[in-house]
Amino acid sequence: MHHRPPSPDGAHQEDPLIHARRCAQRWVWVAAAALPLLVWALWPIGERDLPSGPAPAPVARAGASQRLPLQIAAFDAPIWTLDPPLPAPSTPPPPLRLQLVGMVRDSGAGTGGVLKAVIYDPDADGLVVVAEGARVGPRTVTRIDATGVTLTDATGTRRLLMEQGIP
């Protein structure tokens, strides 16, 4: 190999012609490696004989005079449908603020010992003595027994219980 003498700073420099030749050789090797890949990528794919069913019967094409008119009504069909809107979530009824304070057995003449309930109504801030069928605000007393009182309103039926049943 032909090398130049070392430069004054002591670094070794290669002859520019030799360097150019080595670069050209590298490009030749890269091209030789890439050429088969390029040929493979661009090679046409041969037709394959795929199995198929019987040939379809030839369809006679309608001439201009035999064409059917366009049916516009076919485009009225819905493409998609929307689900019906979900019902609004029902809100739970407000808490029952009435308090069952006690039970009273009315032994008046001809009543035969009717059971009545003593209820505290915080909205009216007072005690109310009620029998079955009476109203306390928007609620109706539907049943009174030894364990509690059943009240009915627009939101449903609720029960006020005694902590201990009456004897």
Image (cartoon, rainbow, N blue to C red):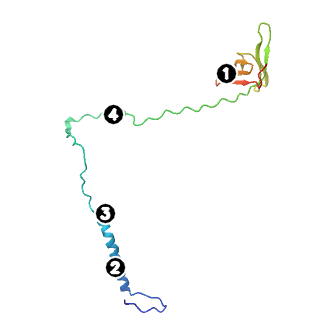
Query: In screen coordinates, is 131 left or right of 54?
Result: right
Quadrant including the C terminus: top right
Q: On the image, which quarter does residue 19 sit in?
A: bottom left
Closer mark to the observer between disc 3 and disc 1: 3
Q: Which amino acid does label 2 sit on?
A: Gln
Query: In screen coordinates, is 45 left or right of 125?
Result: left
Instruction: Provide the residue designation for mark 4.
Output: 74
Where disc 1 sits, the SS reads strand
Q: Which amino acid does label 4 sit on?
A: Ala
- Ranked by sequence position, the earlier of labels 3 and 1 is 3
Instruction: Provide the residue designation for mark 3.
Output: 41
- Ranked by sequence position, the earlier of labels 2 and 3 is 2
- Ranked by sequence position, the earlier of labels 3 and 4 is 3
Label 2 Cα crowd, 10 Å radius (few <14 / some 14-19 / many 20+) = few
Where disc 2 sits, the SS reads helix
Query: In screen coordinates, is 124 left or right of 32?
Result: right
Between the C-alphas of marks 4 and 1, the distance is: 55 Å
Label 4 Cα crowd, 10 Å radius (few <14 / some 14-19 / many 20+) = few
- Ranked by sequence position, the earlier of labels 4 and 1 is 4
Is label 3 in contact with label 1 (beta carbons under 8 Å)?
Answer: no
Q: Which amino acid does label 3 sit on?
A: Ala
Instruction: Provide the residue designation for mark 2.
Output: 25
The circle on residue 152 is 1
- Ranked by sequence position, the earlier of labels 2 and 1 is 2
Q: Where is residue 148 in the image (x, y as percent from the top left)?
A: 73, 22
At x 72%, y 24%, the residue is 160
The circle on residue 17 is none
Where disc 3 sits, the SS reads helix
Is label 4 in contact with label 1 (beta carbons under 8 Å)?
Answer: no
